[in-house]
Amino acid sequence: MKDLRRFLVIWAPFIAASITTIVASHTLWATEWYRGYLAALGVLCCLLGARVLAKTGVRRGPLAGVSFGLLVGQWWLVQALILAFFWHSNGFAP
């Protein structure tokens, strides 16, 4: 029971922030501060991910979980970086 509680205390905020970022990226796209909201949630996810790794230790399982959570939660940023890379590498940039 104590291990489950410790697990939830460490991982739940990170998972909630990642899910909130996914929801925000799909629902707030028409707002003026869309990128600002997503950037703030991205920073929060990174801080919570660092907290998870600090508490659990940098091992394969927690590192994979945090990496997956950041990749899925910050998919909007990953897409923007991939798009910018292809635009600049093919000689076309906005």
Image (cartoon, rainbow, N blue to C red):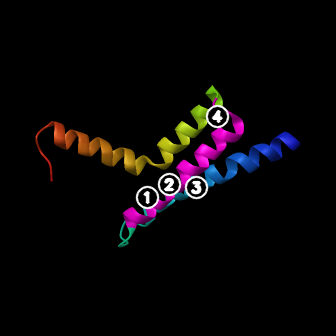
Q: Give the side of residue 29 with respect to residue 5, left or right.
A: left
- Spatial CA distance of label 3 from label 2 is 10 Å
Q: Which residues are magenta?
A: 34-58
The residue most toward the bottom is 32
Magenta-span inclusion, residue 59: no
Q: Relative to 65, is 32 above or below?
A: below
Q: Main secondary structure of the magenta part?
A: helix
| Secondary structure state at the residue bearing disc 2 | helix
- Pointer 1: what residue? 39
Q: Mark 1 near mark 3, Cβ–Cβ under 8 Å?
A: no
Dot 4 or dot 1: first in sequence order is 1
Kindly indicate the quadrant of the structure image that contains residue 82: top left
- Spatial CA distance of label 1 from label 3 is 12 Å
- Spatial CA distance of label 4 from label 1 is 23 Å
- Pointer 3: what residue? 17
- Pointer 4: what residue? 62
Q: Residue at x 53, y 48 (%)?
A: 46
**Given the image, on which type of amino acid does mark 1 rest?**
Ala
Badge 3: how crowded within 10 Å, few (<14), some, or many (20+)?
many
| Secondary structure state at the residue bearing disc 3 | helix
- Spatial CA distance of label 2 from label 4 is 19 Å
Numbered label attached to residue 43: 2
- Spatial CA distance of label 4 from label 3 is 16 Å
Q: Position of residue 4 (x, y in %)?
A: 81, 43
Badge 2: how crowded within 10 Å, few (<14), some, or many (20+)?
few
Q: Position of residue 74 (x, y in %)?
A: 45, 49
| Secondary structure state at the residue bearing disc 1 | helix
